[in-house]
Image (cartoon, rainbow, N blue to C red):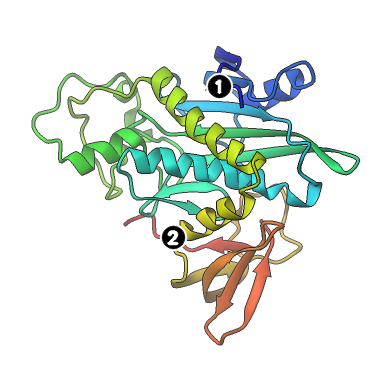
């Protein structure tokens, strides 16, 4: 893919995915829309994506993968997840891919991906990948149970300590509604570490994603799928899950659906359609669609 693609940077936008959709027809593959703040940013399966203005990377990439048949559209999710995984691994982060396409460090979510596809006949004509990567945010005011950011994780892993410097702008005026996350889920004061340069990190991240996409176009789909599987969160480990009933409301985020049967199983991978393959304790193997199961996560490492 041409690395000198168009990048449109906005101060405020309703949604980068929406803007990409509006401009998709006249835009080149690889075009990027990024916003300092989204008024209607969307996450996977009904979630809202919380992101403080000017602190993170919230952007969308336009793909035109007409070489893929519609039934292989999950490969675009895998390309994006693998690209982000590689970017974080390059930063020394022990990242993993939480099926279907969240990115975790330990038991904490650092990135979410929302893929929206358009099909024309027997081709996948347009894929818009919306990506929200927590870069410099140190406080999270929503009820998300387990957020983290690259800055937080870097602070923890490099052992930064000492007296806090002047408060980070994000800490002002939050009152009791804000909470500052660290890698243990507790309060951590701002420490004097320089925030990541958002433009530079966007450039690096796009490089990893575009490289993975080029690998897909060059015929390395199976290798990418294998890399995706090998780095799945909790791969091969028995954990608690909630089986979600087929009639569960479609507009409620999976994490907020409390009704369902608790099971103990281990994720073994996913199929071509992106369904998760789980092995139950009794040896039974079942596949689950995107809204078929919910992980049970404590929110701590």
Instruction: List x then y, in percent, for residue 232.
Output: 48, 58
| Image quarter hosting the C terminus | bottom left
Instruction: List x then y, in percent, for residue 16.
Output: 62, 24
Query: Disc 2 designates what residue?
Result: 297
Q: Quadrant of residue 32?
A: top right
Q: Quadrant of residue 180?
A: top left
Q: Secondary structure at mark 1?
A: loop
Q: Quadrant of residue 237?
A: bottom left
Q: Is residue 9 above or below residue 72?
A: above
Q: Is residue 288 above or below residue 94?
A: below
Residue 196 visible in the picture: yes
Observer-nearest of 95 and 22: 95
Instruction: List x then y, in percent, for residue 77.
Output: 62, 45
Label 2 or label 1, whichever comes before in sequence order: 1
Observer-nearest of 137 and 104: 104
Q: Residue furthest left?
A: 162
Observer-nearest of 217 and 265: 217
Labelled disc at residue 3:
1
Instruction: List x then y, in percent, for residue 33.
Output: 60, 20
């Amino acid at each position: 893919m041409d690395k000198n693609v168009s990048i449109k940077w906005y101060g405020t936008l309703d949604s980068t995915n929406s803007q990409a959709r509006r401009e998709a027809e006249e835009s080149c593959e690889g075009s990027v829309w990024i916003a300092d703040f989204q008024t209607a940013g969307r996450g996977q399966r009904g979630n809202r994506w919380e992101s403080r203005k000017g602190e993170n990377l919230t952007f969308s990439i336009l793909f035109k993968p007409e070489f893929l048949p519609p039934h292989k559209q999950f490969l675009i999710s895998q390309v994006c997840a693998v690209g982000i995984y590689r970017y974080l691994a390059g930063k020394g982060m022990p990242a993993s891919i939480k099926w279907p396409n969240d990115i975790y460090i330990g038991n904490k979510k650092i990135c979410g991906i929302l893929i929206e596809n358009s099909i024309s006949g027997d081709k996948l004509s347009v894929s818009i990948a919306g990506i929200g990567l927590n870069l410099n945010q140190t406080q999270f005011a929503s009820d998300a149970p387990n957020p983290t950011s690259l800055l937080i994780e870097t602070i923890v892993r490099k052992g930064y300590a000492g007296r806090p410097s002047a408060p980070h702008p994000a800490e002002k005026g939050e009152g009791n509604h804000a909470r500052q996350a660290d890698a243990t889920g507790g309060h951590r004061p701002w420490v004097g570490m320089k925030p990541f340069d958002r433009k530079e990190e966007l450039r690096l991240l796009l490089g990893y994603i575009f490289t993975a996409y080029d690998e897909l176009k060059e015929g390395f789909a199976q290798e990418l799928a294998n890399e995706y599987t090998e780095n799945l969160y909790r791969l091969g480990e028995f954990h608690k899950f909630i089986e979600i009933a087929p009639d569960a409301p479609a507009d409620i985020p999976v994490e907020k659906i409390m009704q369902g049967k608790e099971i103990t199983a281990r994720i073994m991978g996913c199929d071509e359609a992106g369904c998760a393959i789980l092995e139950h304790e009794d040896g039974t193997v079942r596949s689950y669609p995107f809204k078929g199961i919910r992980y049970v996560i404590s929110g701590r490492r």
